[in-house]
């Protein structure tokens, strides 16, 4: 038995039946990291020694009956823009290369209270700006299915680590598709929860009105279990919603009879790869056979979503990243003669090209004379996007689209063409603009042997609906049983 092949719920079962110990599980994952990390480059900071020490203490407490939690001793990986007390939080940037967080993000408090074992901080596009994890200051993460391909981004390290069985599950963040798109590229499950369901306190901000912490897992049940841990009201986050606590595993019914699924034709039009369309059309037929009602409809704001997203995201990034000035914390240039030069050189040397590009664009759209023409207009379109989705959900329970217009592309193929890279977000950004929940699950492989993802979008705080619809298809397809990454 390969322990690292198991899902979290399977690990729990084996722990419960005393077929495995916490120590055996942790050691298996450490061995796997030692074997595969040199190929995949998913980690910025590896915490294997600390994990082993923690495991020994935890095992003693479990043996003595001092700890009885469901998740005690289960390993996890954390995206490197989520603050972890006493551990580096770099955002994969030179600017924060040596920053050690003095506090934990709320999600980390929740993870620690369940006694999960943190195996390390995972690589990402710098400050979560990018769609391929090629914009990391430290390394380029590779896709375990094909090491010449990107894993997606910005949570590429999280998706690649789960796909490569180096962690059983991981936390990521999603601003415009940064959990779902890498999940699609790496053949794993990625959930972006409703804005406000999971606290953002301790998540290093990119675009505050769009950012959301979520989960990347091997299957839908694990996804529901991780959401159970991280969801909940937090008074430290003013955008956090005070919702009744739910057990998201209870919604996994494996039944979609009578469910209404809307298919927006704009998401199957120009720019979507033919193989992706064909694969999704087969999935739609499967849902029909299962008793779901499928209807094509028009979501005509889709064409404006990408421009709207990049105006709002860059404007908020420009504002949020103003704090990195070479004075309070983070990188400071060693040579300067006055304050202005300190600011200029610290930011020029500390930020990478993509981050600088977005700061400049964001500053431009917020500047006097352009604010009304760009930023204000984008916020007005945002309201239209929200209204269009609200109208759609009066009629449909779920909206089905591709997660990404293509499978994973080659490393270096789009990194020198920002517009092409931005177009890879075409299917995902509108979800963040509207603050909705969405999940991506793998539904097959393309002719290159790379995973194809399906995205299911739900109404606000209706995670249980999309989890069940995803779970039902997952049970039918059995993707994980049929396909495995080849590391070729």
Image (cartoon, grey):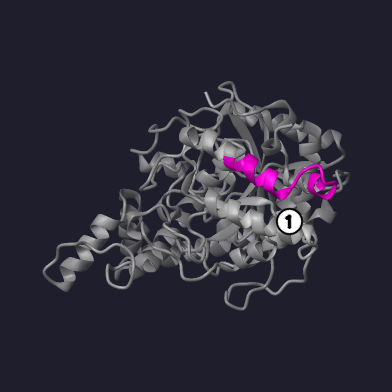
In this orientation, does residue 281 appear?
Answer: yes
- Residue 449 percent coordinates (x, y): 59, 23
Queried whether the magenta region covers residue 26, the answer comes back as: yes
89 is higher (above) or lower (below) than 17:
below
Any magenta on residue 187? no
Residue in the picture at 51% in, 44% down: 156
Image coordinates of residue 448 in percent, x first then y, are 55, 22
Q: Going 22% across and 67% down the picture, which residue do you hit?
A: 343
Quarter of the picture containing the N terminus is: top right
The residue nearer to you, when weighing 356 against 402, is 356
How dense is the environment of label 1, judged by Cα within 10 Å: few (below 14), some, or many (20 and up)?
A: many
Location of residue 279 by image quarter? top right
Q: Is residue 374 left or right of residue 309?
A: left
Number of numbered discs on residues: 1
Give the secondary structure at mark 1. loop
Residue nearest the viewer, comparing 125 with 38: 38
The answer to whether residue 306 is left or right of residue 58 is left
* Residue 184 x/y as whole percent: 60, 39
Residue named by callout 1:
71
Q: Residue at x 88, y 44 (%)?
A: 257
Give the magenta part as a residue range. 13-30
In the rendered image, which quarter is residue 422 located in? top left
Confirm whether residue 268 shows in the render: no
Question: What is the x, y in percent for residue 206?
Answer: 45, 61
């Amino acid at each position: 038995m390969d322990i690292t092949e198991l899902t979290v719920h399977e690990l729990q079962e084996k722990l419960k039946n005393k077929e495995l110990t916490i120590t055996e599980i942790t050691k298996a994952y450490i061995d796997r990291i030692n074997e595969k990390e040199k190929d995949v480059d998913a980690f910025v900071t590896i915490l294997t020694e600390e994990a082993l020490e923690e495991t020994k203490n935890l095992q003693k407490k479990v043996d003595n009956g001092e700890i009885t939690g469901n998740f005690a001793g289960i390993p996890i990986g954390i995206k490197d823009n989520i603050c972890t007390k006493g551990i580096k939080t770099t955002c994969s940037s030179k600017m924060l290369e040596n920053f050690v967080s003095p506090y934990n993000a709320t999600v980390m408090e929740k993870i620690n209270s369940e006694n999960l074992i943190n195996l390390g901080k995972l690589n990402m596009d710098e400050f979560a700006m990018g769609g391929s994890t090629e914009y990391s200051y430290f390394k380029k993460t590779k896709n375990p299915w094909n090491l010449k391909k990107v894993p997606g981004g910005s949570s590429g390290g999280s998706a690649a680590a789960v796909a490569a069985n180096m962690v059983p599950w991981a936390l990521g963040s999603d601003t415009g598709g940064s959990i779902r798109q890498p999940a699609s590229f790496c053949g794993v499950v990625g959930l972006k929860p409703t804005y406000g369901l999971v606290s953002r306190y301790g998540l290093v901000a990119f675009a505050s009105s769009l950012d959301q912490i979520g989960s990347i897992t091997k299957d839908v049940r694990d996804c529901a279990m991780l959401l159970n841990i991280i969801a909940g009201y937090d008074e430290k986050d003013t955008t956090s919603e005070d919702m009744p606590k739910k057990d998201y595993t209870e919604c996994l019914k494996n039944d979609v009879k009578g469910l209404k699924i809307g298919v927006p034709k704009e998401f199957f039009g120009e720019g979507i790869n033919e193989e992706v369309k064909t694969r999704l059309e087969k999935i739609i037929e499967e849902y029909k056979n299962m008793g779901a009602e499928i209807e094509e409809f028009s979501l005509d704001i889709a064409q404006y979503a990408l421009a709207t997203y990049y105006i709002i995201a860059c404007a908020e990034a420009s504002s949020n990243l103003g704090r990195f000035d070479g004075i309070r914390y983070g990188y400071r240039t060693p040579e300067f003669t006055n304050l202005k030069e300190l600011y200029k050189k610290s930011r020029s040397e500390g930020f990478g090209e993509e981050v600088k590009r977005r700061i400049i664009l964001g500053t431009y759209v917020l500047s006097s004379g352009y604010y009304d023409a760009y930023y204000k207009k984008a916020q007005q379109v945002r309201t239209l996007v929200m209204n269009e989705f609200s109208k759609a959900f009066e009629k449909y329970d779920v909206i089905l689209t591709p997660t990404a217009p293509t499978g994973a592309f080659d490393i270096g193929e789009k990194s020198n063409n920002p517009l092409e890279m931005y177009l890879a977000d075409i299917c995902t950004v509108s979800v963040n603009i509207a603050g909705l929940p969405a999940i991506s699950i793998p539904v097959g492989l393309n002719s290159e042997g790379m995973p194809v993802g399906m995205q299911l979008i739900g109404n606000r705080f209706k995670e249980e609906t999309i989890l069940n619809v995803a779970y039902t298809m997952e049970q039918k397809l059995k993707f994980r049983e049929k396909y495995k990454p080849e590391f070729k």
